[in-house]
Amino acid sequence: MFLHFTWDDAGGLGLGNGLLTYGVMFASVVLGFTVLTIAFRRAAPREHQFVRDILAPEVEAGTVSPVELEAVLDKEARKAFRKTAPDHRARKARAHLRPAILDLTHDVAKAKGADSESVQLARVEVARLREEASPPRAR
């Protein structure tokens, strides 16, 4: 509410001075993004644990590898995973693998662990993208 107030009343807080008004607006934006960044960073470990818990059966079944799961959750692991791709086509497929695994996570959570049609389709998509992302000799 404070950020909403500072944005809406920037003219009053800036004492009618255009430059001060823009300064108040700028400070409000910077403070807002700072608060959001802190909130997202504090929430990320818990969300990552939720994803690990939801995908644990998929990792055990081999639908998602532990390396792929870490590439979904960790930025440095994602970069390393993409760099190990043998060519541009595989790198592109690996870039699409992350959203597919997240889609699988959403579908498994929505189905509450059941083997629904959407979960099966998501598994097929992950398998297809993994096939495209793997080195030619490993196929």
Image (cartoon, grey):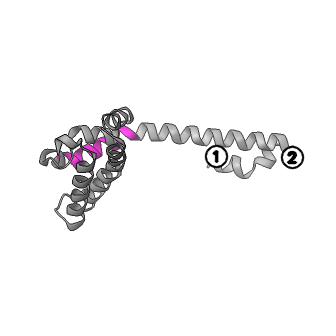
Q: Which mark is residue 16?
A: 2
- In the picture, residue 108 is in which quadrant? bottom left
Q: Which residue is mark 1?
A: 3
Judge whether 28 appears above or below 102 on screen.
above
Please state the horizontal and vertical placement of residue 92, each as a whole percent of the image: 37, 47
Q: Position of residue 26 (x, y in %)?
A: 71, 41
Between discs 1 and 2, the one toward the N terminus: 1
Which residue is depicted at the point 23% across and 45% down? 53
Q: Is residue 99 above or below residue 19?
A: below
Q: Which residues are magenta?
A: 44-56
Estimate how packed mark 1 is, as few (under 14), some (14 to 19) or many (20 or more) residues with alpha carbons within 10 Å: some
State left or right for residue 7 relative to residue 72.
right
Name the dominant secondary structure of the magenta segment. helix
Of the pair 64 and 38, the residue shown nearer to us? 64
- In the image, taking residue 97 as reference, residue 33 lies left or right, namely right
Residue in the image at 70% along x and 46% along y:
6
Decide: is 59 above or below 83.
below
Q: Is residue 4 left or right of residue 10?
A: left
Residue 20, by quadrant, is top right
